[in-house]
Structure formats: structure tokens, C-alpha cells
Image: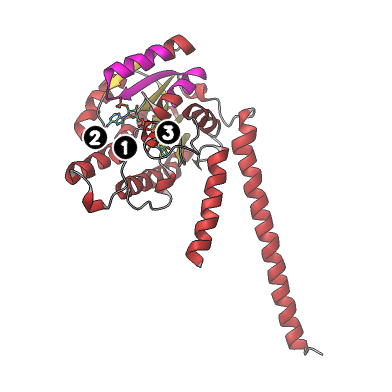
Amino acid sequence: MASPGFFSLELLLNSIGLLSVVWLGLKAAWGLARALRIHVLSWVWKGVDLASYGPWAVVTGATAGIGKAYAHELARRGLNVVLISRSMEKLKQVAAEIEEKHGRSTKVIQADFTHGSEIYEPIRAALQGLEIGILVNNVGQSTDKLLYFLDTDNIDKYIEDMEHCNMLSIVKMTQIVLPQMVARRKGILINMSSVAGHRPLPFQLMYSATKAFDDYFSRALDMEYRSKGIIVQSILPFFVASNMTDKIIKYFKTPAKSFARQALNTVGLTSRTNGCLHHWIQSGYITHLSGIISSS
Ligand SMILES: NC(=O)c1ccc[n+]([C@@H]2O[C@H](COP(=O)([O-])OP(=O)(O)OC[C@H]3O[C@@H](n4cnc5c(N)ncnc54)[C@H](OP(=O)(O)O)[C@@H]3O)[C@@H](O)[C@H]2O)c1
């Protein structure tokens, strides 16, 4: 027969075990319910009415891939759109498509975000007078080759381009647009990080590190400005079909149009998301798998 001391220790351990199982079960159920609200119910029950934040949206890197899809989707939901990219020809083409398809106004700004701070005064001047409800900091670059850091071609330029395009652009565009949003106590900032900013990605380390910066910048900004009526959202997608991923991977890519539509449904419901249900499932799977690998 067990002694009373042993019995009470066994009871204590059993209770801790049971409470842990209940806690993990509740946590999983809460996670699933939240994912259902954010990624499924949001198709019919949106978090916010995007057009009510102001008549204009600004999208950087707006002539292809995810940026172009966001620009179209925002126009479809009733916003006028400012498109910013390097090629004037592509800008005019996308602007014409948006005006024809969605009947909204557009404005184009030609800028190369690999350049330094000097590009932002002309951008500020071009945005003067527009009531901007939404800024989508989408522009970003990666490389199509997986390389050791020191084997990168033209490495000094590469480092500077990645810093400017993937990090400085978000900071400076936010600095330009945020004051008017704070003054109105209303605005949405969407920053395109990547799942590569959540987990280190060797052989694309500058991309991975700059995307981690984007995610941290967004999260801290959200903490600072939430109480001032500003929604800040960090997006960490997996593979979306675009010029960037076309050379890297053939399968498992979400069409950009579908991604933008789903990701915009989540605004106001979550400040940090993989953007769509499919990517949320991939993220859960990878997190679980990497947990097993790192603990084994
Ligand atoms: N695709 C994915 O699977 C994926 C996954 C995670 C995160 N992301 C992030 O999502 C964002 C968009 O990626 P994407 O795949 O849609 O890229 P993409 O297809 O390569 O399109 C990039 C867009 O940015 C513009 N752009 C590129 N470099 C620029 C520069 N230096 N200055 C100004 N505009 C520039 C391009 O237009 P011009 O060439 O005309 O300038 C184009 O409109 C990036 O921040 C990326 O890191 C993408």
C-alpha cells in the first residue's frame, strides 16, 4: 500500500498533468476559433470597412505581384490608389487597368527604393494634399539565387540595396504618412514582412534579416500607436505567385489576387498574420515541426 506522502505526491502530479492537458486543449481551441474568425468568417464579417479610413490608399511596389493585387483589391473596395514603383510604363499600365476595372482614381509616383533618403522628399511632395487612409508598405527585394553571404555578387551594393528597399522604405513611408493619420486618429499601415522574417533563412540572410526588421518595426509601432486609432498590421506570407517566387519555386504558391483579398479581410482582426488560411496552416505545421527538430 502507498504511504500517505506518496499518495499526495501522485495526486499532485496527476492534477498538474490534467490541468496542463486542459490548458493546452483550451489554448488550441482558442487558436482555432480565432483562426476561423480571422481567415474564414472574415469573408462575410469584415474587421473594418477599409474605405471609411480615408479616400486614398498608397501602395509601394504596386506594378506586379502582391502589391499590384493589393492595389486592385483596395480599388475594388472603393479606395483611390497611389501606385509607387520604378517603371513609369508599368505604373501607367496598372493605373489604367485600375481606373477601367474599378472606376477609381489613381496617381502614380516613380521612385527607386534601393536609393537612400533623397527619394522621400519628392514622394512627400507628390502625396501632399491627399487624405490617406491606408499605406501598404509592400516593396521588397530578394535574390533568386541561394548563396553564402560572402559569395554574393557585388556585395556592397547588394547590402545597401536590401537595407534601403526592404527596411528604409517602410520607415520613411511611415514617417511621411503617419502624421496625418494621427491627426485624424484614423489610419491603417500594412507592412509586408515574410515568414523568412519569423524564422532565419540561411543563404537568403539579408532578405531574412531585413524582413525580421519589418516585423519588429510593425509590432512595436502597433504597440505605440494603437491607442491613437492607428491599425498596424505585419504580414508574414509563405509563397505567393509573383516575379519574386517564379524563379525559386514552381508549386505551393497562392495566387496574388486571392492572397490580397484574404489578407485585406483580416485587417482590424489581427495585427500579425500569415495573410491567409492556407499560409496559417503552413505556419502552424512548420512551427510544430521545427519545435520537434530543435528539441530533438
Ligand atoms: N511572393 C512571395 O511569396 C512573398 C512571400 C513573403 C513576402 N513577400 C514580400 O512581398 C513583397 C512583394 O513581393 P512580390 O513577390 O509581389 O514581388 P515582385 O513580384 O517582385 O514585385 C515587386 C514590386 O515592387 C516593385 N519594385 C521592386 N523593386 C523596386 C524598387 N527598388 N523600387 C521601387 N519599386 C520596386 C516592382 O516594380 P518595378 O520593377 O516596376 O519597380 C513590383 O511592382 C515583398 O516585400 C516581399 O518580400 C513575398
Q: Which residue type does callout 3 highlight?
A: Leu
Q: Which residues, given as a range, are shown in magenta?
A: 70-97
The label number, if any, that marks residue 114 in the structure image: 2
Q: Which of 249 and 277 is in front in this view?
A: 249
Q: Which of 230 and 36 is in front in this view?
A: 36
Q: In the structure shown, which secondary structural element does the residue marked by tag 1 occupy?
A: loop
Q: Which residue type does callout 1 highlight?
A: Gln
> Label 2: few (<14), some or many (≥20) within 10 Å?
many
Q: Which residue type does callout 2 highlight?
A: Thr
Q: Nearer the viewer's eye, disc 3 or disc 2?
A: 2
In percent of the image, x 54 and y 31: which residue is there?
A: 262
Q: Nearer the viewer, residue 186 or 7?
A: 7
In this rendering, position of residue 256 left or right of residue 19: left
- Residues under labels 2 and 1: Cα distance? 9 Å
Residue on which the image places disc 1: 141
Magenta stretch mostly in which secondary structure? helix
Does 79 appear above or below 174?
A: above
The answer to whether residue 78 is magenta is: yes
